[in-house]
Amino acid sequence: MSRMLTWLERDSPFPCVSAALASTGGLLAAGGDLSARRLVDAYARGIFPWYSPGDPILWWSPDPRMVLYPEELKVARSLARTLRRRNYEIRVDTAFGRVMAGCAAPRAGEGGTWISPEMIAAYTQLHELGVAHSVETWIDGELAGGLYGIALGRAFYGESMFTQVPDASKIAFVHLVRQLQRWDFGVIDCQMNTAHLARFGAREIPRADFIAQLNNLVNLPAVPIPWRFDHDLAE
């Protein structure tokens, strides 16, 4: 029998991730809300929201899951040379709203964005709670690119990145991964398989393995806020 999609009321719990519809790429449920409590509960369970503006909130848990283990990071030679030039500055959590706005901006060859004002408001609240973070590349005093994501315990969930200067988002990503490795983060959730992330060493693992890792990692002590990156991460 085919499974029915679960509709969430405001206080409804998430179904088990094994109920996600494989035929849709891991669609688990619809409805609910984007409260901080709901979002933290979702990420801790290996679930994330992704939907188009105007549609109901859709919740996903794909199988397999794309992840990057910090110790498996791969950096292309050309990017390594750019990192060594150090003609940029990395800042953390100084322009979260601008990073989200940059990620939400239309991109060449693409249609609309899934990062709606509702999503920006929800993740900004998580940022104010110290759960969501932005990593930013600044060049000549201007925001050149960056990324944002969620940190629970010692698990990081990458959400989106943007760039206005070639390699700016990649620079921020490499600094983030290297710092997370020093902080003993066990996994970076990349959600969906993309060639871009695979070039950095991300790979697919069974969802069951991912959930088992999360069950341990999200309960480890969080890194104290405000976040501060080390200064030698370009090496």
Image: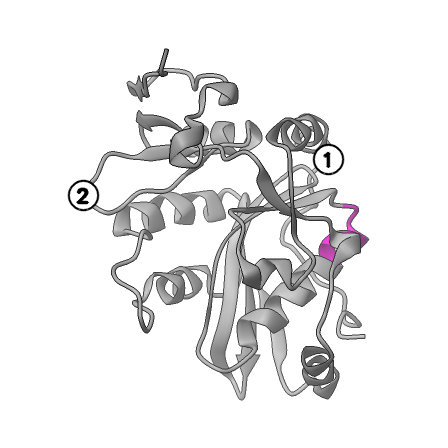
Does the rendering let one see residue 35? Answer: no
Q: Quadrant of residue 164?
A: bottom left
Locate residue 207, reporting x and y percent: 60, 31
Crowding at dot 2, Cα within 10 Å, few <14 / some 14-19 / many 20+, comes out as few
Q: Residue furthest left?
A: 54
Callout 1, which amino acid? Pro
In the image, 37 versus 26, the foreground residue is 26
Q: Which residues are magenta?
A: 179-184
Screen quadrant of the N terminus: top left
Locate residue 116, reporting x and y percent: 28, 51
Left or right of residue 87: residue 132: left
Residue at coordinates 62% horizontally, 78% vertically from top-left? 89
Q: Quadrant of residue 174?
A: bottom right
Crowding at dot 1, Cα within 10 Å, few <14 / some 14-19 / many 20+, comes out as few
The kind of secondary structure element at disc 1 is: loop
In the image, 42 versus 193, the foreground residue is 193
Residue ID for mark 1: 221
Which is the main secondary structure of the residues drawn in magenta? Answer: helix
Check the image and report above or below for 5 versus 49: above
Q: Residue furthest front?
A: 1
Left or right of residue 154: residue 65: left
Q: What distance separates the C-alpha of mark 1 from that of mark 2?
A: 37 Å
Query: Residue 222: within the magenta?
Result: no
Residue 54 bears which disc, if any? 2
Residue at coordinates 30% horizontally, 57% vertically from top-left? 113
Mark whose residue sits in front, 1 or 2 = 2
Q: In the rendered view, how is the structure colored?
A: one colour
Check the image and report above or below for 23 versus 198: above
